[in-house]
């Protein structure tokens, strides 16, 4: 008799936000937040436009898009948490083509439908908008602890730690070009700010052990013209959603996209 394989389910994004915020208030979380502020801010010098949105207000006062040249920095989180917009990431109440940048703060790690979350980000981004993704790196000390303690069902170790190459594949299906991808925070997941301060010099090993960092930052740009006709799970762009942040006029209506067929050069 064959045994049934147990598939571990991802936590629901709405339910994970409050526990994640509590974890980021710990010594380990605060040490990570300080590092994130520096790492993300240094990567957004080429982002300019009217507005952007950060999904997940896990650290009060930490605005990941602060380093971008945007006039408005919106915050979206689950109902009950402090944010400009309260909604589910799987159904953003934001008009299409209105955001120059979208920042996913552990969104994919704690979402039971990461493909739908990416589709929603794609919908609200402008044609040359950027998607910034922050997640936990499975190939790290954080990943090892995740593998050993996921059964406890406590955040953040009960999430789904997706490898960067897997997320990159998802983005390629949506016709995004990855601009840069790097892991950070070499120090072990020890919940003691005092010990982590003493281990601060370990971050100097980034040059040699950067791929083993506990978190990763990935930045991708939306491509105006798709490179292939193939779509595995991308859906047609949704119409304009009702939102107080929607642009005025008819600029949010769906626009036709050019399709470039793949050409096989082997047959001449």
Image (cartoon, rainbow, N blue to C red):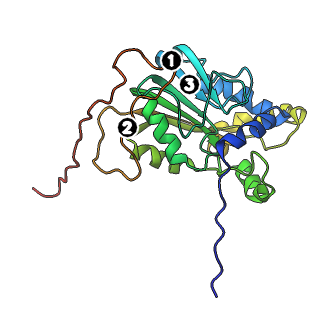
Tell me, yes or no, whether the two marked residues, 1 and 3, touch with CB atoms within 8 Å.
yes
Residue 229 falls left or right of residue 53: left
Residue 121 position in % (x across, y down): 49, 35
| Numbered mark located on residue 158 in the image | none
Mark 1–mark 3 distance (CA, rounded to whole Å): 7 Å
Residue 1 sits in quarter: bottom right
Q: Residue furthest top?
A: 71
Residue in the image at 66% along x and 80% along y: 3
Mark 1–mark 2 distance (CA, rounded to whole Å): 20 Å
Whether residue 131 is visible, yes or no, is yes
| Numbered mark located on residue 51 in the image | 1
Quick one: 105 or 96, which is closer to the camera? 96
Whichever of labels 1 and 2 marks the residue nearer the N terminus, that label is: 1
Q: Is residue 92 above or below residue 6?
A: above
Quick one: 66 or 264, which is closer to the camera? 66
Residue 207 position in % (x across, y down): 63, 37
Q: Secondary structure at mark 1?
A: strand
Q: Which residue is mark 3?
A: 53
Residue 60 position in % (x across, y down): 74, 23
């Amino acid at each position: 008799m064959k045994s049934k394989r147990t598939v571990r389910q991802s936590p629901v994004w709405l339910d994970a936000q409050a526990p994640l915020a509590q974890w980021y208030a710990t010594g380990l979380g605060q040490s990570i937040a300080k590092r994130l502020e520096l790492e993300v801010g240094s990567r957004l010098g080429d982002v300019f436009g009217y507005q952007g949105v950060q999904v997940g207000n896990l650290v009060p006062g930490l605005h990941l898009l602060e380093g971008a040249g945007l006039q408005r920095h919106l915050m979206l989180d689950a109902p009950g948490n402090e944010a400009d917009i309260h909604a589910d990431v799987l159904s953003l109440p934001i008009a299409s083509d209105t955001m120059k940048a979208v920042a996913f703060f552990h969104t994919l790690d704690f979402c039971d439908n990461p493909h739908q979350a990416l589709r929603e980000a794609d919908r609200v981004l402008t044609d040359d908008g950027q998607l910034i993704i922050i997640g936990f790196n499975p190939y790290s000390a954080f990943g090892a602890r995740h593998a050993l303690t996921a059964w406890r069902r406590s955040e953040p170790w009960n999430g789904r730690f997706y490898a960067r190459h897997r997320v990159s594949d998802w983005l390629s299906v949506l016709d995004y070009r990855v601009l840069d991808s790097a892991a950070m925070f070499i120090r072990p997941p020890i919940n003691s700010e005092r010990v982590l301060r003493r281990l601060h010099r370990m971050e100097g090993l980034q040059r040699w052990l950067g791929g083993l960092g506990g978190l990763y930052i990935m930045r991708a740009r939306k491509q105006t013209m798709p490179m292939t006709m193939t779509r595995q799970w991308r859906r047609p762009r949704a119409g304009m959603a009702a939102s107080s942040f929607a642009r005025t006029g008819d600029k949010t209506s769906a626009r036709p996209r050019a399709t470039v067929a793949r050409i096989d050069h082997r047959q001449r």
